[in-house]
Amino acid sequence: MTMLNNNNIVSFGTHQGKGAKELSSQNKKIIASCRIILTNSLPKCFVFLGNLDDTLFKLADQAKNNLEQSEYFNVMRLFRLQKDNLQNEFTKLVLNDFDLFFSSSSVDSHNSESSPNLGLELALLQDDDLEEDIAITRIATKSNEVFGNEFTQLTSRFAHLINRPATTKNPLAAERIAAHLKEVISPVTSNLAIKLQAYKQFEQQAIGELKNLCLQLNDELIKHQILPNLAQRKPSQKHSATSPTSSIEESNSGTSNLISNQGEDDQNTSAMFEQLRVSLNRNASLNTQNGGSGSFNIADQQSILSALTELQQIPTAQVSMSQNGRYQLPELRQLLAGNLQAGSQSVSHIDEDTINVIDLLFEFILEDKIIPAPMRAMIARLQIPMLKVAIRDKKFFSTKNHPARRLLNNLAKISTGWSQQNNTQQDLIQTKIEAVITTILAELDTDISLFEQLNLDLKQFIDQQGQNSTVSEQRIVKANEGQEKLIAAQQQVDNVIETHLSQHSHLPKVVISLIDDGLKHVLKLRLLQKGIDSAEWKYSVALLEQLIWSVQPKPEPSDRQQLSQALPKLIEELKENLSGASFNQPKIKAYFEELNACHVQCLQGDQLEPAVLQTIEHRSKMSNPAEPEALPEIALEEKILSDQEAIEKATTLEIGTWLEFFDEESPRQIKFSWRSNLTGRCLFVSYHGLKAADLSLAELAGLFQRGQAKIIDQFEPLMDRALISMMAAINQQPNSTEK
């Protein structure tokens, strides 16, 4: 319990004293990374101020008099003006608690200043103070209800970091957070009604952010192997009214309630499982009561599960590497037989069938090319846990939404795109998958809720990784789109200039120089900034036309008069457009002097001297988009697709498709992120959202043609792929003769 001492300091545990041990450098780094998470996350708690603003506006609208209304508006204005200060002060107070908790001089003597009212005796509180403290207490209580489990784990991990008992007070306790909220809100207003509204909005919106903060801190500590296998406390409200735990044995009825529209799919999948049993030379009518050979006792389910739990912890019962460098599954039947009372018991026919089907499932996983090989090996370590689930709960095969089945699918899904080549980066995905699998191997007994908890945690991880990857990917795509806009704009400008120049055989060299060194850049800037339909673009094109017209021979007096009237404005507009710092002004000034000489001759009706003229070389206009390149030459026997098929496959490839490339020493999986509308070039990114490849259509088509690129179907869940593949493989075998 938090104790209050005489100098108004709240003590979190006993002082460590002179014998305190200095924190290790590694632990200091871990604490620093947690502090960064705190610094970034705590300001998010103040998202509630947006809704508070709306609430205060409504209250002002309903105010009984002008004075009350004015107070609401004044406080609204103060909250808006002081939003950043409130966030910073709140963050500072929490970080002070955090720093003091981990300080080397008093690692477990967390002292921090309490809010003013916390030290008063309850009997001395006025009604307003009491009501406010009740609201603060409600925030703390609600926080404990929402993320008490995550907070308990965080407390244990913090305590482990400083080598103190798990009962050590956590500096991020909900009571402290609520007290700091009160401390930063109180100076803004003394109006109890407004403060209660603020606390209510914080309770409704910020508690979710605090839960996310706990999850992030736990993930960070798990990543550094701080109690990674810590068991989670089961929720004790609502769902526990029926049963304190949700066991695998009870999940036959429980998981059926998770879905209501499986119907036909369930029947098909269940029928598939029965066909798998028949194809494995088993009589479909046999069940657990038929037993095995008469010389053995049939082991009951509990004995089998206990034996499997023991095997779950043994390295020889895990996937291993064969002499030829291939991953191989353990001989579970032999290991299990040896564990069942020294071979005096055997398993029933249906349990043996289940073992065989699980073997087939994990053999498929080890061969599934969609999952990178190292990830297949990690996922295959779940063979025994999944066998335990399947023995107790046959709905594992027939219910697509079964928690254990969903976990397998999710692990396979986040493995897509993982590459061992990313060894220079902190591999969060590999670390996460290892943590999930380690947790299952260490903690799974008969409690299926473990899979639900891990699925929820995995979903949050996938969402976070997806957001990070998307940000990186969008940054790369926007950079490429920007570059393409520059190229497209340059092509458009070049085509416009070519159109006007091509109408003449000769033009003054100074005009060509002014266009190349000046007007071309003006045109491109106008096009990028304003667009092809804008008045600014059309004005710039007209200026180009006017410049070219001005240096044409003027044999007629009317033409010379028109030129004389137009020249002052033309020169002024040209100088204005070419006056920027990006232009070489001395050179531009010299161009205008040469241009003036040309204009003098034109006004006199004279032909320009051949020495000042340049022959116009007519260039072909650039097309948009560019024509596809020719495919690289490939020997006929090496082609698995025709030229037309390969080009069509490359041009119709959809954005977001994952591919596996075999063009390097080891396969890599990358995602098609963007295609250039101008050149057809294709951009690919890694699962981090970083640029992985940039290929022309011809290069991509060539990879398809040689079989060095393969589309990955990541939309079909792992379990569905496995069952379909298993059935197809067995149907290709000749029917066995039953004995």
Image (tube, rainbow, N blue to C red):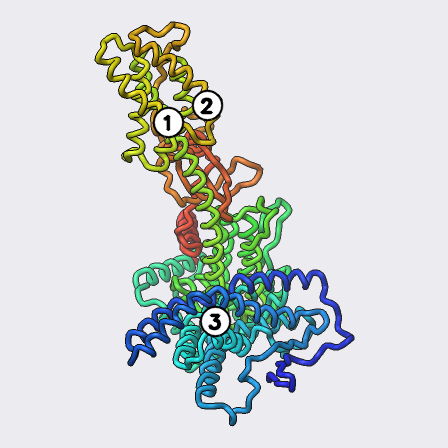
Measuring from the top left, give residue 583's x and y in whole percent.
Answer: 46, 27
Q: Circle 2 sits on which residue?
A: 633
Distance between the Cα atoms at labels 1 and 2? Answer: 30 Å
Measuring from the top left, give residue 156's x and y in whole percent.
Answer: 61, 73
Q: Circle 3 sits on which residue?
A: 449
Q: Circle 1 sits on which residue?
A: 491
Q: Is residue 15 above or below residue 576?
A: below
Give the SS element for disc 1.
Answer: helix
Amino acid under label 1?
Gln
Q: Can you tell which quarter of the image residue 197 is in?
A: bottom left
**Residue at left 53%, top 41%?**
667
Q: Residue furthest left?
A: 558
Answer left or right for 450 relative to 109: left
Answer left or right for 466 relative to 428: left
Q: Nearer the viewer, mark 3 or mark 1?
A: 1
Amino acid under label 2?
Glu
Visible in this render: residue 334?
no
Amino acid under label 3?
Ser
Measuring from the top left, give residue 20's x and y in whole percent.
Answer: 75, 73
N-term mark: 1 or 2 = 1
Distance between the Cα atoms at labels 2 and 3? Answer: 57 Å
Measuring from the top left, give residue 53's x and y in whole percent.
Answer: 37, 69
